[in-house]
Image (cartoon, grey):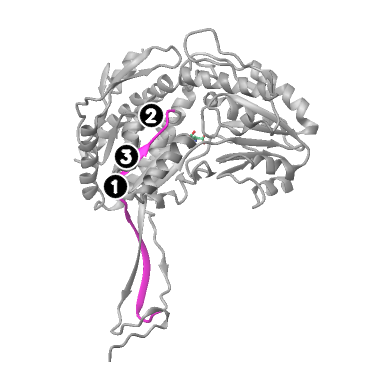
Amino acid sequence: MFTDVLSRLGLSEINPGAFARDWLKCHGPELVSLNPATGQPLGKVVTATHDEYETVIRTASESFLKWRLLPPPQRGEIIRQIGMSLRQHKADLGLLVTLETGKILTEGQGEVQEMIDMCDYAVGLSRQLFGLTMASERPSHRMFEQWHPLGPVGIITAFNFPVAVWAWNAAVAGVCGDSCVWKPSSNTPLTAIAVQQITNQVLKQHDLNGCFTLCIGSGSTIGQWLAEDRRLPLISATGSCHMGRRLAQTVAGRLGRSLLELGGNNGIIVTETANLELALRAVTFAAVGTAGQRCTSLRRLFLQQSIADEFLERLVAIYGQIRIGNPWDANVLLGPLISEQAVADMLHAMATAEGQGGKVLTGGHRLNRPGNFVEPTIIRATSGMSIVREETFAPILYVMTYEDLDQVIQIHNSVDQGLSSAIFTDRLMDAEKFLSPAGSDCGIANVNIGTSGAEIGGAFGGEKETGGGREAGSDSWKAYMRRQTCTINYGSDLPLAQGVTFDVN
Ligand code: UN1
């Protein structure tokens, strides 16, 4: 069954790791894509060497010259067709996401839907790349701004959203007139190749091959080359704070722009007036969904003292009912972690938490079966434990209690990351306080909704060590364009701004 899916998506046993105008014969080290639920290989990819990387960048640079001159709505039409093609392949591609990442089927499908949503959004956006007109202080002058395509952009994506995050960037960058160079995670090269194939079918019909390109290889080779490459005015990267810090420094070293979506350490506050039913469901999805491997996953839960015991008792009971297993099986809610290393990291974080005084309330074990399966884990903690300040990409939830809302908001904000946050309350004043300037310091702040599962229409991203970038909706498109301020003099005099005179005679 899986072999059929792979072949329907145009994947073979050994795949080329780079696409410029065509698939390139690559000569870099071989990469094996493993199914994290079985540990078995799904396929192999030959990664790109520096020569192949050069071909990709040259192609993206040349293609940009043509792509940038297409009227934006015509670029939108290409993105619309890519969206249509993704719709046709949704079931297969969703399953491939599940096979390669281990996320459950409904989430694999959801991810493809997120790409489709991004394409639809970008089609509309292609007619809305608005600039402003300003009032000029000089007579017979008109001043306005316009937005132009930026250039070829590098897009570095992580394993956990192997295709949606490419679409956040590529669909928007595409209508903005940028060509794209994609470096996917080494854990998920096959989904990237499949998406490239789907995109190619559309591009080929319009003789636009080369506007969306792909280059597979490690972060220390392809990732580093992208960061250093002056031909790429923008590098958009998703991954750990550690990766982002290094990348940002390299890109800044050449005065390029980076757009970063890095780690989170997301918290939910449940107040004494909260609808506990709602909060329990949201906490479970946010902490256990995608096996805790979203940057928006819930890691810190703050319970008001008066509801803490009841809430925890019910939460532990819910955790006991979570079905763990093959992510493609219906009814399973928790698939495997991405790798052996991720399991080791989780076990290490738990041991550290226990060493710091944390108490495991449920979970805590690796499953005795092939694949990277772990139990979802709740640890009773205190905010003084240093491990609570760290992001571990695994289903570990640290639970703390609090008395006073102002105080807990401060504790909530005291970590280095600032991606997503939420409060559960039926009290308007508490909700508004959480959203006020003295409230959550995160890029995303929700009321009676969990921390994960954002829609594409909003700008996605966070503050502090999360990197400050915003992707997907709202006015995120501005990051992919260059702003030009233009002033036109339609008079026969040359008045200077600020009343300056400069007459030779
Ligand atoms: C990520 O984990 O990098 O809000 C992105 C969410 C998803 C995106 C997560 N729409 O959880």
Task: Specify the amino acid type for callout 3.
Answer: Leu
Ligand 1 closer than 8 Å to label 3 CB: no
Is residue 154 one of those drawn in magenta?
A: yes
Residue 226 circle label: 3
Distance between the alpha carbons at the discs numbered 3 and 1 = 9 Å
Eye-nearest disc, 1 or 2: 1
Name the foreground residue: 105 vs 289. 289
Eye-nearest disc, 3 or 2: 3
From the top left corner, tell me how far across and down residue 48 is, in percent.
Answer: 26, 29
Q: Which residue is mark 2?
A: 185
User: In the drawing, does residue 272 fall left or right of residue 494?
Assistant: right
Task: Specify the amino acid type for callout 2.
Answer: Ser
N-term-proximal mark, 3 vs 2: 2
From the top left corner, tell me how far across and down residue 451 is, in percent.
Answer: 59, 36
Location of the N terminus (image quadrant): top left
Rendered position, 89 above or below 54: above
Rendered position, 108 above or below 402: above
Task: Specify the amino acid type for callout 1.
Answer: Arg
Residue 374 circle label: none
Residue occupying the point 41% across, 44% down: 249
- Judge whether residue 236 can be spotted in this image: yes
Question: SS of the residue at dot 1?
Answer: loop
Q: Which residue is mark 1?
A: 230
Span colored in magenta: 138-159
